[in-house]
Image (cartoon, rainbow, N blue to C red):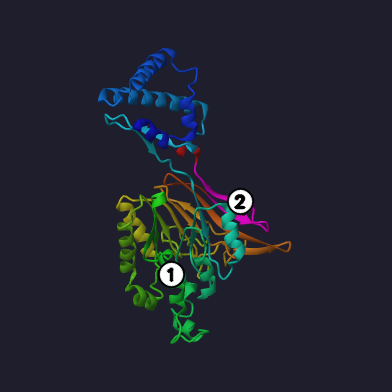
Amino acid sequence: MGIIFDLEKKLSIPLLLLFLFPVPCLSRLWCAKRTTQVISIIKSDSYSTVRDFNELALFVQTYLVFLLVLLRRLCPNLAEFPMLEIDSKESGMTSQKKQSKTLKIAVVGDIHDQWEVEDALALKQLGVDLVLFVGDFGNESVEVVKAIASLNIPKAAIMGNHDAWYTATEWGRKKCPYDRSQEDWVQEQLDLLGAAHVGYSKLEFPEWNLTVVGGRPFSWGGPEWRFADICKERYGVTDMEESAAKITAAVKTAAGDAIIFLGHNGPSGLGDRPEDPCGKDWHPIGGDFGDPDFAEAISQTINLGKTIPLVTFGHMHHTLRHTKKVLRTSVFRNPQGTIYLNAASVPRIIEHDGYKQRNFSIVHLEAGVVTQAALVWVGKDLQAISEEILYELSPSKL
């Protein structure tokens, strides 16, 4: 009876109940004949032979397929139940095929010191599976990073230009509030985040068959090679070409079938108008301020045949400097179906009628495809009070 015990372990409760209590619409003649054969096998206690095992397995297998087809008809939302896949081997055994669930991802835009206990509670309330941080936690704000590192939800993060504010440039070092010969707040942030920091690296999420790959950390944006010292000293990278190669190297070792790219600034190639996702909105107005190395790494990833459902980033705030009449375009979809999401809705915490509201970009990923992206504002009771749909996949393309 080992085969029945094995099946009982694999079957979901709904299917098991249907198996134990046959439905009237099944073919009575076939059921009566096959059931009689199976009962005689069991009563005779001679089911250890190969023929009897195959007879029993065939009965169970065919019965289950019939029930599954019926259940599909009766229950359109059958995706909630585990599917049964019939093995083609002669043993007639069945195996459980794991269904891909919708993955709910929160992308947290440039924080700039706006992170509170309520943010972690809101993420729990929203029921997200994964949180992605695009950087700019503050001006080397160790305490903010410490709070984020303690977040008990799967996460990945990348550092922004403000996260090396007092370290990466000469003018920043002159304003440094701490003794750099005694302390290194940049390294403290990196140590706190540990493996969650994916700059020039990756983080595997095997439970979702997904790998998050980071772009260039501490990016200032644009075609010029900025923050040269920190890139060379901490990562051994000296130019855009080496930077693209280092990002691509992380992709080549990725275990997941799907790659999500996480950058502080977005890649070049998303438009040169000031309102485009990485468009330059300060004088002289216009121009593509995306990262060329990031774009090259994404291009090479496509050439490698990898699936890229999402590229997300921040840095270029939605509120434009040169006009208040429009906001920056936050979503772009390329011909391959990749969604590029700028999550920098800044300030991310505002006050309205004496109460705070905070925003998160919420992305739904299903079977390696982004089905929806939205900007969600959460109110005082940690419930979503508004949702702006930024992108939604047409049902015909599912």
Q: Which residues are magenta?
A: 373-393
Residue position marked by numbered label 2 in the rendering = 387
Q: Secondary structure at mark 2?
A: strand
**Does the CB distance between marks 2 and 1 fall below 8 Å?**
no
In screen coordinates, is 109 left or right of 224? right
**Nearer the observer, 284 or 300:** 300
Examine the rendered structure and indicate whether residue 76 appears above or below residue 123.
above
**Residue farthest along the top direction in this orientation:** 29
Q: Is residue 213 magenta?
A: no
**Is residue 382 one of those drawn in magenta?**
yes
Q: Quadrant of residue 201?
A: bottom left
Q: Say whether residue 141 is visible.
A: no
Q: Residues within 10 Å of mark 2 (few under 14, many from 20)?
A: some
Disc number placed over residue 300 in the picture, else none: none
In this picture, is 209 found above or below 272? Answer: above
Image quadrant holding the N terminus, namely: top left
Q: Residue 276 appears at what percent x and percent y?
A: 50, 59
Q: Which type of secondary structure does the marked residue at label 1 adopt?
A: loop
Q: Residue at x 68, y 59 (%)?
A: 380
The residue depicted at 42 percent of the width and 61 percent of the height is: 267
Amino acid residing under circle 2: Glu
Amino acid type, residue under disc 1 in the picture: Ser
Q: Do we see residue 16 in this rendering?
A: yes
Q: Position of residue 257 (x, y in %)?
A: 35, 49
- Category of crowding for the residue at label 1, using alpha-carbon neighbours closer than 10 angstroms: few (below 14), some (14–19), many (at least 20): many
Check disc 1 and report the residue beneath it: 219
Query: Quick one: label 2 or label 1, which is nearer the N terminus?
Result: 1
**In this view of the protein, which residue sits in the foreground, 293 or 161?**
161
Q: Position of residue 293 (x, y in %)?
A: 36, 64
Residue at the location (62% across, 60% down)? Answer: 358
